Image (cartoon, helix red, strand yellow):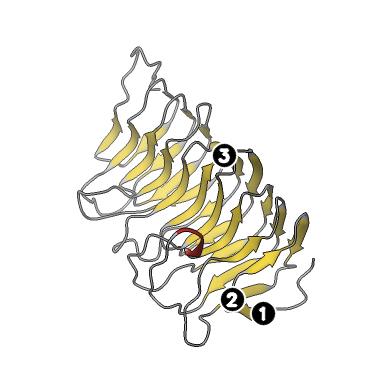
Amino acid sequence: MRLASDCRTDASLEIPDGITLDGAGHTISAVDPPGGHFTGGILTNAGRSASVINTRLLAQSLANVCDASDNRLRGIFLDGASGILRGNTVLDIHQGPSACQEGNGIEVWNFSGDTVVVEIADNVVDGYQKSGIVASGDVDATTRHNRVGASAPQAIVPANGIQIGFGAWATIEENQVTGNRWPRADAAATAILLSGSAPGTVVRQNTITGNADVGIYIAAREATVTHNLVIDDGAVGFYDIGIVNHGEDNTVRDNDVRGYDERYFGVEPGTAGGLQVE
């Protein structure tokens, strides 16, 4: 499928099973339907396989209404499907000054029991609400060469640039990620968050800049975090830590961490967990 021109939609557009949507650089804008509000992903899958390439997505002045589960706002949403998400620009997936736990730029989740495989590469994601790129569940996600900016309403909702969790496995490499800042002690906003990611997840050679409470937050086990450049610049929030380890048997080594009040938390040289600092 090839998009012939810019267009608007007030409901999710489903990609047929096994089909690649090539946006050819055109823009799909999400707007609220008459008498209601936009729900779900702007683009989503109809079957077990779907891909999106070269497509520009944005949301326009959406109503601030909180939704749950499948109805949460997303830009591209693959639910139980494998595919390739490459060369897309996903902007302003938010509901204005909203604290709703939704508004993810690119999200892949799968709780069907069969693993799906997704490549998320060479995308630009900026101005999202809660998270830039998310993978959750039985997902193998290769996430590389993406540029992920900051959340639009980050002073209202704690946000994350890239989040891998609920058993998802990922290689996160050579991305450029701008951090997020949350002013209170009840949460920390991050650039890259591993929250229950599968053992073997790798975070390497990423460049993290901007103003993040935490550059890389590891709440997982058997992850490898290596050769990342983590730089903080801006006002200090309640937290200001380069790399946090709250997991077991993780390997943290050869990272370049600068500008934080505290470079590491839970990372000690030569510990039994195999943690190493450069």
Q: Based on the displayed image, in which of its 4 quarters is residue 245 positioned?
A: top left
Is there CB contact under 8 Å for labels 3 and 1? Answer: no
x, y (%) of residue 216?
A: 39, 39
Q: 271 left or right of 35? A: left
Q: Which numbered dot is residue 169?
A: none
Mark 2: give few (<14), some (14-19) or many (20+) Cα within 10 Å.
some
Would residue 111 appear left or right of 98 to someone viewing this image? right
Q: At numbered mark 3, what does the secondary structure look like: helix, strand or loop? A: loop
Give the quarter of the figure containing the N terminus.
Answer: bottom right
Amino acid at circle 3:
Asp
Q: State the image coordinates of residue 223 (x, y, percent, origin top left).
A: 47, 27
Front residue of 106/33: it is 33
Type of amino acid at the residue the image marks with label 2: Ser
Label 1 belongs to which residue? 7
Q: Quadrant of residue 17?
A: bottom right
Which mark sits nearer the N-terminus, 2 or 1?
A: 1
For label 2, the SS is: strand
The answer to which of marks 3 and 1 sits earlier in the sequence is 1
Answer with left or right where residue 143 lies relative to residue 96.
right
Q: Secondary structure at mark 1?
A: strand
Where is residue 146 shown, x and y percent of the image? 58, 50
